[in-house]
Image (tube, rainbow, N blue to C red):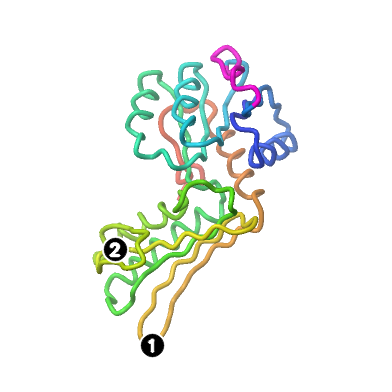
Amino acid sequence: MKIALVGYGKMGKEIEQIALNRGHEIVLKIDVTNQDDLTIENLQKADVAIEFTIPNSAINNYKLCFEAGIPVVSGTTGWLEQMEEVETSMKENNGTFFYASNFSLGVNLFFELNKRLAELMNGFSDYEVSMEETHHIQKLDAPSGTAITLAEGILEELDRKDKWSLANQREANELVINPIRRGYVPGIHTIRYESAVDTISIKHDAKSRQGFAFGAVLAAEFSVGKKGFLGMKELLNI
């Protein structure tokens, strides 16, 4: 499989190593030094694009991939308010878009565990739920896309909460997310349900970027030959 890497930072380099180890070929690498090379002609040399950039450039990157007729796999977060625009472009070009806020296989199992716990806790209003997420200082968005996905899972199942907030002083209907940025932390997400007598918590602690990169390569392999909007649920069949 021939891969275009749109975004060749730390994550792009991790993806490259895993892709090469799995027998794939990198035919295009785009970073801040050669953005003019991101053209339809160059993208068409690849079977699939893997995109990890920043919100300000992601939308145009997706559209170029759709126009080039190749699937795009993306883990860029912070742009979801423009999802309708992306989906429209994908459909107009009969394209393929695999999006995940987190490509780690463990995190996606954690998403399911989180929803199940929220479902169980729905009948126990003595427990107040909160979330803490910790990432490296280079991460630009807060809360993380993973934290937002976790929050959405809780809101679907927990009737007493209908929105998330970063505010320190919450309303009763708000799920508070506390984002922390320090050091070189790949990602830690903790959900807590606390009552006067005890605390129930679940946590996912990423040891490195490798798990995210491996999932992104699996997503690229999965996307070739498919059409439409894809995600980790389809890949993992959960």
Marks 2 and 1 sit apart, C-alpha to C-alpha, by 22 Å
Give left or right: position of 222 versus 194: right
Which residue sits at x=39%, y=74%? 193
9 in the magenta segment: no
Occupied quadrant, residue 48: top right
Q: Residues within 10 Å of mark 1 (few under 14, many from 20)?
A: few
42 in the magenta segment: yes
Where disc 1 sits, the SS reads: loop
The percent coordinates of residue 156 (x first, y second) are: 30, 57
Residue placed most toward the observer, 36 or 41: 36
Which residue sits at x=65%, y=55%? 184
Q: Is residue 1 visible?
A: no
Which region shows up in magenta?
A: 33-43
The percent coordinates of residue 228 (x first, y second) are: 41, 29
Q: Residues within 10 Å of mark 2 (few under 14, many from 20)?
A: some
Q: Is residue 96 visible?
A: yes
Which residue sits at x=52%, y=33%? 73
Q: Which is more N-terminal, label 1 or label 2? A: 2
Q: Main secondary structure of the magenta part?
A: helix
| Relative vertical location of residue 156 with respect to residue 62 in this rendering, above or below | below
Disc 2 vs disc 1: Cβ atoms closer than 8 Å?
Answer: no
Give left or right: position of 174 versus 209: left
Badge 2 amino acid: Glu
Occupied quadrant, residue 90: top left
Badge 1 amino acid: Val
| Relative vertical location of residue 221 with respect to residue 90 in this rendering, above or below | below
Which residue sits at x=27%, y=74%? 123
The percent coordinates of residue 107 (x first, y second) are: 52, 55
Where disc 2 sits, the SS reads: strand
Residue that label 2 marks: 174
Q: Nearer the viewer, mark 2 or mark 1?
A: 2
Q: Which circle marks residue 197 in the picture?
A: 1
